[in-house]
Image: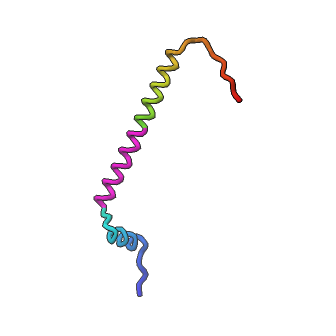
């Protein structure tokens, strides 16, 4: 009995699970778009924080830390 390559076995498992190349490409695209959206959201938050800091007065305030 000939040994089978691991890549062939993985391909068969994925095929049996109904996961083909097209589904993997769509999923990869969705994940990457999600990462891009998360980064854009984080950049917007950073810009808002910078705008708040720039608009704050030069007077400092004392904060008690326990």
Q: Quadrant of the C terminus?
A: top right
At which x and y percent is residue 7? 40, 70
Q: Quadrant of the N terminus?
A: bottom left
Query: In front here: 63 or 20?
Result: 63
At which x and y percent is residue 22? 28, 59
State the residue at coordinates (45%, 25%). 48
Vertical side of 27 occupied by 13: above or below: below
Vertical side of 63 occupied by 16: above or below: below
Q: Is residue 26 left or right of residue 47?
A: left
Does the magenta portion include 59?
no
At which x and y percent is residue 2? 41, 84
Query: In front here: 37 or 11?
Result: 37
Vertical side of 57 occupied by 29: above or below: below
Q: Is residue 3 left or right of residue 25?
A: right
Q: Main secondary structure of the magenta part?
A: helix
State the residue at coordinates (40%, 35%). 40
Q: Quadrant of residue 63?
A: top right
State the residue at coordinates (44%, 31%). 43
- Span shown in magenta: 21-38
Q: Is residue 28 left or right of residue 52?
A: left
At which x and y percent is residue 60? 62, 15
């Amino acid at each position: 009995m000939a040994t089978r390559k691991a890549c062939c076995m993985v391909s068969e498992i994925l095929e049996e699970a109904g996961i083909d190349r097209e589904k993997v490409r769509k999923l990869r695209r969705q994940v990457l778009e999600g990462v891009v959206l998360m980064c854009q959201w984080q950049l917007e938050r950073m810009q808002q924080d910078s705008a708040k800091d720039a608009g704050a007065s030069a007077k400092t305030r004392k904060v008690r830390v326990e």
